[in-house]
Structures are given as structure tokens and as C-alpha cells.
Amino acid sequence: MNGYEATRAIRALERPDAGEIPIIAMTANAFAEDEKEALDAGMNIHLAKPIDIALLRKVIRQCVCKRDGNKRDENKKD
């Protein structure tokens, strides 16, 4: 099972949080069609390798803040 299949399986679960859990693609595939495929599979965001740690932290923070409905730390510097 690859990441796209795993994402589709998670999104298809009959759980209230299945559509809300953040799924971040981290891949060496950096073309626009790769990003589209990840998003079409149900992933929230696509990050190409090599991973920018500051960007990853920002993305995770945004996912957590969105989930918690808390925007206070969204613009915090790393």
C-alpha cells in the first residue's frame, strides 16, 4: 500500500475524524501533477523533498491550529 492508497483508505473510514485528520505528503516527486495526485487522494498538503524544516513546522502548526480552532500560534516564528 502506498501513501495515496493509505490516504484513500483513511478518508474512507466510517469515523467522524477520518476526513479531518491531517495527512501531509512528503515526497521526492515535485512536479505539479504529483501535487495534484496527492491532493486528489485526500492529502491536505504536498511537500517536496528535501524537506524545509521551517515550512514543515509551519504546516503542522497550521493543521493543529485549524483542528483546534486556535489561530493564536499560527504566525509564530520558528
Image: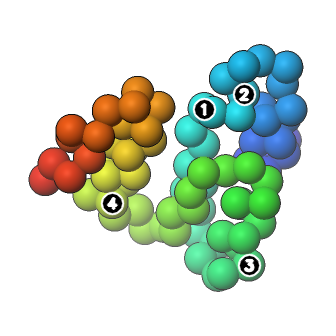
Going 51% across and 63% down the picture, which residue do you hit?
Answer: 47
Say what amino acid the circle numbered 2 marks: Ala
Q: Secondary structure at mark 1?
A: loop
Alpha-carbon distance for marks 3 and 2? 25 Å
Alpha-carbon distance for marks 4 and 2?
A: 25 Å
Front: mark 4 or 2: 2
Q: How is colour applied across the structure in the image?
A: rainbow
Q: Residue furthest top?
A: 15
> How far apart are the two marked residues, 1 and 3, measured between alpha carbons?
23 Å
Q: Characterize the local packing of mark 3: few (<14), some (14-19) or many (20 or more) Cα atoms within 10 angstroms.
A: few
Which residue has dot 3 on it?
A: 33
In the shown orientation, is residue 70 left or right of residue 38? left
User: In the rendering, at what x and y percent does residue 56 appear?
Assistant: 37, 53
Q: Amino acid at mark 3?
A: Glu
Q: What is the CA distance from the residue labelled 1 to the residue labelled 4?
A: 19 Å
| Residue drawn at the location 60% of the way across and 51% of the way down | 44
Q: Earlier in the sequence, mark 3 or mark 4?
A: 3
Q: Identify the disc placed on residue 55.
A: 4
The residue lying at 72 percent from left, 70 percent from top is: 36
- Quadrant position of residue 29: bottom right
SS at circle 4: helix
| Image location of residue 21, percent across then percent down | 60, 32
In the image, what residue type sits under mark 1? Ile
**Foreground mark, 1 or 4?**
1
Say if mark 2 contacts mark 1, CB within 8 Å. Answer: yes
Q: Vertically, is 21 above or below 47?
A: above
Residue 21, label in figure:
1
Mark number, residue 18 = 2
Type of residue at label 4?
Answer: Leu
